[in-house]
Amino acid sequence: MNYSQNQCANLLCEIDLILKKIQDLCSSIKSDLVANTMNEYKLLVDEIVNLQQIYEEKYLNDIFDNILYKNIYNVFENILKAYEERNREKLLYELQNNLVNCLVNLKENIILDPVLQKDSRKLHIGGKEKKDGWEIFDAIKEEYVDHLGNAKDLSKFRDDTFDIIYASHVVEHFDYKDELLQVLKEWKRVLKPNGKLYISVPDLDILAQLFLLKDIDINSRFEIMRIIFGGHTTDYDYHYTGLNFEFLYSFLYQTGFKNIRRVNKFSIFNDTSNMELTSIPISLNVIAVKEL
């Protein structure tokens, strides 16, 4: 079991302990609604809020933010209001239903997330960084590459093989006219139903805005041009497509992907998905799902 899986196992145990404490607190409230109830509740709140600080695996941040913290502060407010009103029934409802549901939802998302699952198959197209559980596919032979080939041809893999495909700054290397849709369809083919595609590209909207800034120096402007057209360091380092969210969404939708959403960071690899120029992130990071 690697570091991430250890972190997740410990986190799941911690969530179970908090759920048990909520159950005990509810039993106390049913017996008597006293001032000490709020002291116990505040300790629980501290434990819940501190979960993300204790378990510092960066990938978990997105799950915490979108699954737990997006909803739980409203629940905290409702619990406090119910206590101030001495409304035992409402207080128990908020604790037993809404607060518990937030934590159970967090737990289920951690358990089911394919990035965190030990036995899931994960393909990193164009990857450079070895990581437990990930298979690297690349066109250039290197010691760390598991599968050699062109990313538009994954015929060595059967249908529904992978739980996740991850590709950062790859699809812009394919022609938007007759290659890009073919590539995305091929990737979708080898994804399992409900499998996820993590895709990052240079964001043409942001790069265009940066290029037109009047106070930017010539070296930075030249670097922006290279990101748009490719570095031309190898035969593969040429860009044939410029993408913003609108364009990428359209290509993914035409391919049949669903639940297409933009995220700030993947926090899985230290790669071009995190690239910045003049402290401004220039990558468009998108997650899409293959339908069941």
Image: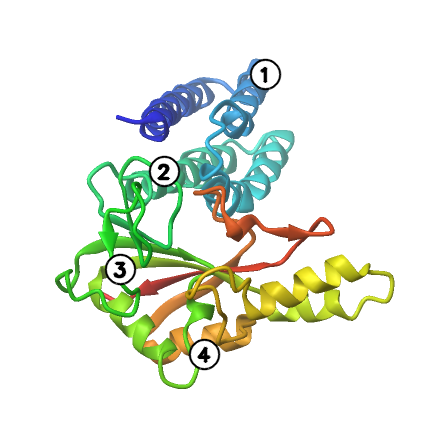
The spot of residue 206 in percent (x, y) is 67, 65
Q: Return the residue at label 4.
A: 250
150, 176: nearer the viewer = 150
- Side (left or right) of 240 relative to 118: right
**Foreground tag (3 vs 1):** 3
Q: Is residue 276 left or right of residue 270?
A: right
Q: Amino acid at mark 1?
A: Asn
Between 235 and 193, the one lying in front of the other is 235
Q: Label 1: few (<14), some or many (≥20) within 10 Å?
A: few
Label 2–label 4 contact, CB within 8 A = no
Q: Residue furthest top?
A: 36
Mark 3 vs 1, N-terminal side: 1
* Among the 4 quarters of the image, the one containing residue 117: top left
Dot 3: within a 10 Å radius of its alpha carbon, few (fewer than 14), some, or many (20 or more) residues? Answer: some
Q: CA distance from mark 4 to mark 1?
A: 52 Å
**Percent of width and height locating residue 3:** 36, 26
**Is the residue under label 4 in contact with that under label 3 (CB below 8 Å)?**
no
Q: Residue furthest left?
A: 158
Which type of secondary structure does the marked residue at label 3 adopt?
strand
Q: Tell me the kind of residue under disc 4.
A: Ser
Label 1, secondary structure: give it: helix
Type of amino acid at the residue the image marks with label 3:
Asn
Q: Which residue is mark 1?
A: 39
Relative to 92, is 184 above or below?
below
Quadrant (top left, top right, bottom left, bottom right) of the C terminus: bottom left
- Mark 2 and mark 4: Cα distance apart in space: 34 Å
- Which residue is label 2 attached to? 104
| Mark linked to residue 172 | none
